[in-house]
Every structure is written in C-alpha cells, then in structure tokens.
Amino acid sequence: MNKISMKQSGALFISFSVFSILCISLLSCRDNGPSCIVAPDCRGDSAVRFAVIGDWGWWGQADQMKVASALEKIGAECPYDFIVSTGDNFYDAGVDSLNDVLWNMSYEYVYTAPHLQCPWYVVLGNHDYRGAPSAEIAYSNNSPRWRMPSKYYKEQFVTGSNETIDLFFMDSNPYQKDLLAAGGAYPELNGLDTVYQDGWIENGLRNSTADWKLVVGHHPLYTCGMRKGQPQYMRKFEGLFNETHVDAYLCGHEHDLQVHKPQGVVTYFVSGGGGNKRPIQTPFEFTHFAQSSLGFMVVEVMNSKMTVTTYNENGQVLHVESIAH
C-alpha cells in the first residue's frame, strides 16, 4: 500500500474517507469477494519464488491470454525465480515434433512478457502423451527457458536464508489405468515401466535432507473438481509422502484451483486454471479452498515458511495458504 502523508488540518477528512472505505470493504467481505484477501508483501530477493500454472496449452485463445497477462502482472511486482508447469502443455493431442506449430501458438507467442522469460520446469500431462512427449524433452535443447531433462527429474533450490528446497517432478501418467486401457491413443505411454520411477521417488524422498520437499505431478491425489468421484491412482503415494515429510504436492489435470489438507503432513494444491475452467463439486471437509476459476498460484519460501497465493485471471488474490516449519 502507498503511504500517504497529510497535514493536520486534513486529518478529519481523511479519517472519514478511510472509515467509508473500510465499510465498503466489510460489505465486500460478506460476499467473499477476492478484494477481501490481501496478497503477502513481496519478501525480497532472498526468497525462492515461483509460479505454478497448469493445463494452459490452449493455442493462444482468449482465456489463456488473460492468465498469461495476470502471470506477468504479478511477476512484475515480485519476479519469479522460475515457473512450474503441472502438465497438459499442449491441447488437444500434444506436439508431434520439435517443429510443431503449437510450440509457437500455445507457448512462444503467448508467454512473451519479460517476467515470464525465467526457466519453466515442466511435467507431462495426459494430453501431452497423445502426441510425442519425447519432443517436449528434446525441446529443452532448443529453448533457453524450457526445462524438461526427462520424464521425471529432481531440482534443488536454496533460499537467501540457506533453506534448501528439493522439487521432485514426477510423471503421473503411467499410473493412470484408464490411460493404459486406451491402447494406441497414447503411443509413448504403452509399455512404460513404473517400477523404476517408484524406486526413484522413494529413494529420492527418503534420502533427501532438504528443508523443504515438494512433489509436482499432473494428476491429483485429492480433487473436488469434475473428476471427484473417479479413482485417484496417485493416492498410492500418500503413505510415502507422509512418511518422508513431503510438504506439498502440486498438480493440475482439473481445470480449476484447489487446496486440500487431509490428515497427515502434506498439503495438496491443484493449479489447473491456465487456460480453461470447469465446475467444482462439493468440497471435502478438509478442503481449504476450491473454485472454478482461471488462474495460477505463486509459491514463496523463506524463513521457515512457505506461502502459496492463488490468483485469478485478473491478478486478484483468491486464497492464501501458509505452511510453517
């Protein structure tokens, strides 16, 4: 907020104005409007700060452009160290090669603003598997910001206060029995062995000594979105995540924004509003936030605290979730 200096003679008028604004805000809060929630102050360059956006690859259509604009707006206020994509990067059937026109239509010609030129750490969604996921991996060699060294991988970051953050980027698609049953619709998915990835994530989490452990995938463990009543195959990892003290699981797949905190240590975030939205169903009793909305999330880690702020396509704050150590 801007600080306002005033002369003593104008104090009464200003006080009345502030009272009037407060009354308006209270009325707005009764409607649960986004103006009731204030984003955390930018915490300086010593924090690790990254945006989380999913299900965004909609060929540069209007809703995708709105979210891209808001992503830049918030990044201009508090620059991102990097951006995390939770998958479904290219609708409707992924990309078929490094020369696919969708690289420009859905990515290069959309996220052109200066504060979106930081590294993008990417996972694969089910729609990406309808094409050639290998092309998305190979694109890492063509782009200075696209980072996907393999179908699953780990990155580590360090805050200015010397807190370490291990980010495990999973490929959740081979665990989806419905995709495996679809046969030739997902050519690079058939025959994938999950045993090696199971060992990779378990060993990685158990051996990690990082202050913060975050896991990124495409498919949720918990959702009250369109797929609430469907099997959530990634829930097989819930016990492991709790045993190894994973702080948060970040995903997409559902075209909405959600925060869940069931029993255990893990907080589950769904950020899939990058270019399309779908209805929300009845929340769980442990749901902290769920809204059918375009938008994205911003994660900030510093001084033994992780703050996750959810924004809509206009850059308004919808929810703030904090995790403290």
Image (cartoon, rainbow, N blue to C red):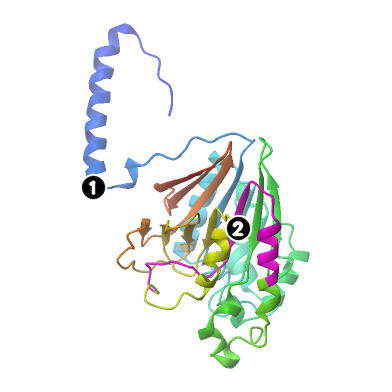
Indicate the position of residue 119 as horizontal and vertical percent values. 68, 54
Quarter containing the N terminus: top left
In what element is the residue under mark 2?
loop
Residue 7 appears at what percent x and percent y?
35, 9
Q: Quadrant of the C terminus?
A: top right
Which span is picked out in magenta?
A: 199-226
In the rendering, which numbered label is found on residue 220?
A: none
The residue drawn where x is 22% and y is 28% is: 20
Q: As drawn, which residue projects farthest toward the front?
A: 243
How many angstroms separate mark 1 from mark 2 (CA)? Answer: 40 Å
Location of mark 2 (residue): 244
The amino acid type found where label 1 is placed reads: Asp
The residue at 47%/74% (across/down) is 232
Mark 2 packing: few (<14 Cα in 10 Å), some, or many (20+)? some
The residue that label 1 is drawn on is 31
Which is nearer the N-term, disc 1 or disc 2?
A: 1
- Tell whether position 210 is magenta: yes
Cβ–Cβ under 8 Å for marks 1 and 2: no
Please state which of residues 60 and 296 is positioned toward the viewer in this rendering: 296
169 vs 238, left or right, is right
| Residue 24: image location, x then y, percent | 23, 35
Q: Is residue 53 visible in this depiction of the protein?
A: no
Pick the residue in front: 300 or 196.
Answer: 196
